[in-house]
C-alpha cells in the first residue's frame, strides 16, 4: 500500500486490550465524542433497536467482574459500554421512530405511512428468536462503530462476549427497562505491562479473505 | 459538544446512499485502504469467521439488482461488498487460525493448545442455528467497521439487508466456497440528485439511548 491513511493506522494501532490501567480515566470531552459516534451508528431502516448502558460506577464495575468469567476489564477500564437490544420491537416502537422522523424532518406522519407499514410488517413476520437475532446483529454494527470511533481518538478498547447475560440484565436492571444485554466493550487506557499490546496482530491475508468478482 | 472531532463529523456526513452516481468509481489506492480496514476488523477471539466478496463486474452487479428488491445500489455503486460468513466453523477452521497465530507471532502450536481447545469447545457447544447467528453477528462488526472506514475516506456507503440470500449465494457461487451471504454494503459516490443526501439525519436523542450507571 503506497500511502497509509489515518483510518487504517488507527485500526492497526488498536488491539483487544486485556489489561487496562485503572488509574487512567477518559476525559469528559473525549467521552462525549465516543458517545456521539455510538449514537450516530447506522442501522437497518435507521430503527436503532438498541440502547447503550455506560457503566462508570466503580462498585458496579467490580461486581460485573465475577459474571464476566473473572476477566478484569470491567473493573479496570474507564468506561464499560453494555450494548443492549430493545426487547419489544413492535408497532409502538416503529411509531416512536416515525415520530422522530416527522419531528426531525418536519414532514407529516401520513407521508411516512408506507415506510411505517413496511417496518411493522418486517418485524411482525419474524418469530421471537429471529427478532432477537436480528436486533442482536444490529448491536454488532454499534460495536464496530464504537471500536472504530474510540480507536480514532486513541482510546483503547476491548470487545467482550464472555459474560453472563442474565446476570448483567439483573445487576443493571435491564429487563425493567425493556432491554437485554448483547455484547460489551470496555474502553480506557492500556496498562503499561499488558503484554498483548506488543503482540503482532493476527489477520488472515487479504488474498484469503477478500474475493474479487 | 465543545470541539467536534473528525471521526464524529465523518459519521454525521455519511447517510444511507439511495442513489449512486454510476459514472464515478473509487480509485485503487482509496479502495485498498477500505479493504485493509475491513481485513483489520476485530472479531471474537480474532477468529474472523468471514470472507468479503467485492463485486465490481458490471454484468454481475446488474444481475444482482433483481434479487435485491430491485434496489439500484448494487448496479450503480462503484464496489459492492458482500459480507459472508464461513459456513463450517469447526476444529479445522480453528487450527487454521492457530497456524496463522503461530506463524505471525513466532510461537509454538503447543503454547496455543489451551486457546485452541477453548475455541473448539465454544464452537462445538452451539447448534447449527446458534452458530449461524453468532457468525452472522460477527459479520455486522465488519459492516460497522467498513462504514466507518469508508466514511473517514469520504466514500459514500449504504448497508443493505433487503436481498435474497439464496440468490446471492447462487449467483456468486458462495456455497461452493463454503460461504453464505449475510449483509451487503454498497460503496461509491452519491448522485447529485439523491434527495436523501439532504435529509436531516434521524437519531434518537442521547438522553434516550444512552443510560449512565
Image (cartoon, coloured by chain):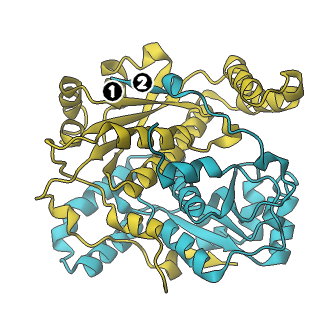
Chain colours: A yellow, B cyan
Determine the residue located farthest toward the top in the rendered image: A176
Q: Which mark is residue A102?
A: none
Nearer to us in this view, A70 or A150: A150
Which image quarter is the C terminus of chain A in?
bottom right
Q: Residue at x 62, y 35 (%)?
A: A130
x and y, in percent, of residue B29 in the image:
58, 81
x and y, in percent, of residue A203 in the image:
39, 72
- Determine which quarter of the picture holds residue A62: top left
Q: Residue at x 48, y 73 (%)?
A: A5
Nearer to us in this view, A181 or B37: B37
Q: Nearer the viewer, mark 2 or mark 1?
A: 2
Give the SS element for disc 2. strand
Q: Is residue B111 left or right of residue A210?
A: left
Q: Residue at x 27, y 63 (%)?
A: B116
x and y, in percent, of residue A38 in the image:
49, 41
Badge 1: few (under 14), some or many (20 or more) residues near its Cα, within 10 Å?
many
Determine the residue located farthest toward the left in the rendered image: A193
Mark 1 falls within which chain? A
Tell me, yes or no, if residue B185 can be seen here: no
Same-chain status of marks 2 and 1:
no
x and y, in percent, of residue B106 in the image:
21, 81
Residue occupied by mark 2: B211
Is residue B101 placed above or below B66 in the rendered structure?
A: below
Determine the residue located farthest toward the front in the rendered image: B2
- Determine which quarter of the picture holds residue A72: top left
Nearer to us in this view, A109 or A107: A107
Circle 2/circle 1 CB separation < 8 Å: no
Alpha-carbon span between mark 2 and mark 1:
14 Å
Give the SS element for disc 1. helix
Q: Residue at x 72, y 38 (%)?
A: B200
Residue occupied by mark 1: A168
Is residue B85 placed above or below B177 in the rendered structure?
A: above
Amino acid at each position: 500500500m503506497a500511502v497509509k491513511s489515518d483510518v487504517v493506522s488507527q485500526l492497526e494501532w488498536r488491539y483487544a486490550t486485556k489489561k487496562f490501567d485503572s488509574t487512567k480515566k477518559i476525559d469528559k470531552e473525549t467521552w462525549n465524542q465516543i458517545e456521539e459516534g455510538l449514537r450516530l451508528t447506522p442501522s437497518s431502516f435507521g430503527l436503532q433497536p438498541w440502547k447503550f448502558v455506560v457503566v462508570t460506577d466503580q462498585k458496579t464495575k467490580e461486581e460485573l467482574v465475577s459474571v464476566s468469567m473473572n476477566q478484569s476489564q470491567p473493573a479496570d477500564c474507564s468506561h464499560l459500554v453494555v450494548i443492549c437490544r430493545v426487547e419489544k420491537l413492535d408497532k409502538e416502537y416503529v411509531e416512536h421512530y416515525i415520530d422522530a422522523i416527522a419531528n426531525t424532518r418536519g414532514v407529516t406522519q401520513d407521508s411516512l405511512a408506507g415506510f411505517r407499514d413496511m417496518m411493522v410488517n418486517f418485524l411482525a413476520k419474524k418469530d421471537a428468536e429471529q427478532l432477537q437475532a436480528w436486533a442482536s446483529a444490529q448491536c454488532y454494527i454499534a460495536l464496530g462503530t464504537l471500536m472504530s470511533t474510540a480507536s480514532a481518538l486513541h482510546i483503547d478498547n476491548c470487545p467482550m462476549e464472555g459474560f453472563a447475560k442474565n446476570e448483567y440484565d439483573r445487576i443493571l436492571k435491564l429487563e425493567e427497562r425493556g432491554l437485554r444485554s448483547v455484547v460489551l466493550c470496555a474502553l480506557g487506557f492500556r496498562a503499561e505491562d499488558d503484554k498483548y499490546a506488543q503482540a503482532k496482530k493476527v489477520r488472515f491475508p487479504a488474498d484469503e479473505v477478500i474475493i474479487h468478482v
